[in-house]
Amino acid sequence: MRNKESLRSRAMRSRSLMWSKKAVLLAVLLALGLVFTGAAVVLAEGDAPPLLPAFYDLQIKTVKGVDVTTGTVKAYIDGQVAGEMDIAKAREKSEPIVVNGDDSTAGKPVTFKVTVDGKEYAAVSDPASVLWQSMDVITLKLTIDAEVAGEPTEPTTPTEPTTPTEPTTPTEPTTPTEPTTPTEPTTPTEPTTPTTPTTPAAPEKEVKLTDIGDSWAKEKIEALVGRGIVGGYPDNTFRPNNQITRAECVTILVKTLDLKPEEGASFDSYSDASSVPEWAKPYLAAAIKAGLVKGSTQPDGKISLSPQEPITRVELAVIAGRVLAQKSGTTPAADLTFADKDQIPAWGQDGVKDAVAGGIIKGYPDNTFAAAKQITRAECAVIALNLLEKK
């Protein structure tokens, strides 16, 4: 009797499970039916189905290698927010940032900004160039120049106070025993100490960057660092292949051209005034005053500076061309011969002609100019030194 009940019970459970699976399958089929029905309606109306987003798995660190665990990340395409992510929640669930786009944004650069403790930082991505494509699934490393809890290296710098051991040199007062020897006149040899002005060679110690040994721009990077125009990172790296923002690049050019920083300048007339970093304001104002930077007009008619966006080759060429035009007062008439010259926007044609004719910027070995390519720190250093040598 028990065996019959057991068999009946098993049969009922099996039947229930079978109906449960059928219900799930039916739900899936219904969902797929709705999807295909919707797609058919869209296609019937002559509209293309929407593009699916791209997914980027982000690893975010500071320049000192400390993980950024809180804050938000925003992805931008053409200056517009295309995706946003809460860092803490994404880390907890191992979720990527979802970046939306359409046909007009396909193949365009994606840039990132990270907000930590209420401050927004332009992020440098690795790989350096990220172009939006529907359904891309990519792992990216983002680096920001920010201080967060856990920064380890700075506390070591207090070790420099050990240099006060130099006070041991006061033992030299014992040399006054030498007054017994008329050789004190030899002390005028101390004028040799004026060689200490060679201590400005100290900056050359800072030139000992650990990651430029194989860089094509090594000598020019060292020359700019030696002049105090550019510097490396706290970990003694220069990161020559990293992107550089418009604010950073303009600051280097202003220092190179020895323009006077404009303290206390107002940027209220620009739509993105709040995104201009405090440290960059005097230099950006100097560049604007000198007519080197003019900003770009947005669709709404407002003018923006985009100071934290990566600068492109055509943008830097235009600035360099303005510098040369101010020096010579003439514009070279030579036509551009680059294979991709048609991709240089009309507003950048004259600037590129000036910069190329003046030997400030060159094309690539394949005879392309790559106008939309983002400038690297190494390229900015070379162009800045080329302008310096034109002074």
Image: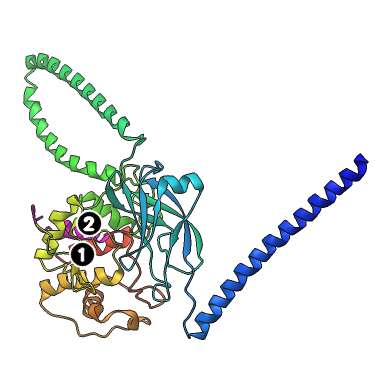
Q: Position of residue 140 (x, y in %)?
A: 45, 55
Q: Residue at x 26, y 45 (%)?
A: 204
Q: Give the magenta part as a residue range.
A: 244-265
Mark 2 lies on residue: 275
Left or right of 191 in this view: 44: right
Q: Amino acid at mark 1?
A: Leu
Specify the amino acid type for callout 2. Ser
For residue 252, side relative to residue 261 (left or right): right
Q: Is residue 200 magenta?
A: no
Q: Is residue 360 visible?
A: no
Distance of label 2 from label 1 (alpha carbons): 9 Å
Say whether disc 2 or disc 1 marks the residue closer to the N-terminus: 2
Of 22 and 313, nearer the camera is 22
Residue 149, by quadrant, is top left
The residue labelled by disc 1 is 305
Q: At 29% from the left edge and 55% from the top edge, which residue is drawn?
A: 221
Left or right? Give the position of 54 relative to 241: right
